[in-house]
Amino acid sequence: MACEEKLKVSEKHSKTSPEEPQQTPSEPSKEAPEGEWRKLTKPILTLLLCAFMFLTGCATVMTGKYQNISVTSEPPGIQIRSCTGVSLTTPGSFKLVRNKDYTLFAEYSGCEPQQKELKHKLQDSFWTNTLIWGVTSGAVDLASGASDELLPKKVHFDFTSAGQAAASRQQSYLESNSDTSEEVRFAILNELAKKGMTKEELTASLGKPDLIDQEGESEVFVYNNLKIQRYYFMNGILKETVSSQQKETVSRQQKWSRLTP
């Protein structure tokens, strides 16, 4: 009987004893771990960068609206003035807006003044960038001028006897032929060749050829001191230019084709 009473008292004591506090699962921290935060910020930054490049234009990001034009002279130390009014002493460079034309003037004591022209044109990569980044990007580049580039990228003034003779030849031709197109005028002032030139225009630009040759129906002007040496004319109009290296490669290929069955 005493044992039963003890058991009842023990059971009663166990029921009335305070319950131990239950361990509840810890609540997730309100702050994301550092690794998760980095995972979130990386795609966000990537999207912001893509949006920035799309809205500002690829060319604007890659090249900007300005272009540095290197200017040298022989002899060095000559004062060069841009049509914008900015001057420099050679060697140096002008920082110019890409979508405008410019004229550079040079004066040297005892010599006739010389001038060079810079022309802007659409960059070759513009349409590719527009296809990749969209029409909005292309429109922004056109508006800012980043879509263009200035040519030539380097300008050299030559006040040696040969350089003065070339400048005099160019100016004399242009003064006598005021109806010369802007494209040809630009080529002559920069001693360049352009398809569609006449023989007189090419001579004004590069001087008299070292040799006049004949290949089939083409009359060929040969210049031995230039990278591109052979200029092909049909009916007095420049149709093609070929370097001596290209000429040798073609000749070897033709010879090989005749030897092989």
Image (cartoon, helix red, strand yellow):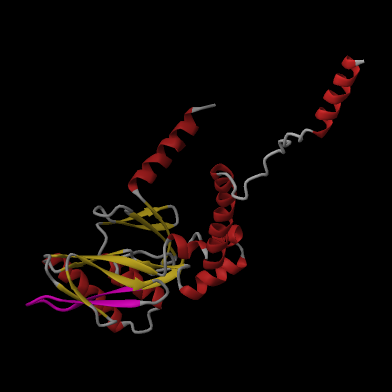
- Left or right position of 141 against 131: left
Query: Looking at the image, is 2 positioned above or below residue 18?
Result: above
Residue 51 placement (x, y as % from top left):
57, 62
Is residue 42 at all visible to an observer of this figure? Answer: yes
What residue do we see at 49% from left, 33% from top? Answer: 257
Can you tell which quarter of the image residue 24 is in? top right
Magenta stretch bounds = 102-118
Q: Among all residues in the image, which is located at the extreme right?
A: 1
Q: Is 114 or 59 nearer to us in this picture?
A: 59
Tally of numbered tags: 0
Residue 61 placement (x, y as % from top left):
46, 62
Can you tell which quarter of the image residue 132 is in? bottom right
Q: Is 217 or 93 nearer to us in this picture?
A: 93
What residue do we see at 34% from left, 84% from top? Answer: 178
Quadrant of image for the N terminus: top right
Residue 212 placement (x, y as % from top left):
30, 57
Query: Looking at the image, is 242 positioned above or below residue 249?
Result: below
Query: Looking at the image, is 128 positioned above or below residue 93?
Result: above
Q: Is 121 or 254 nearer to us in this picture?
A: 121
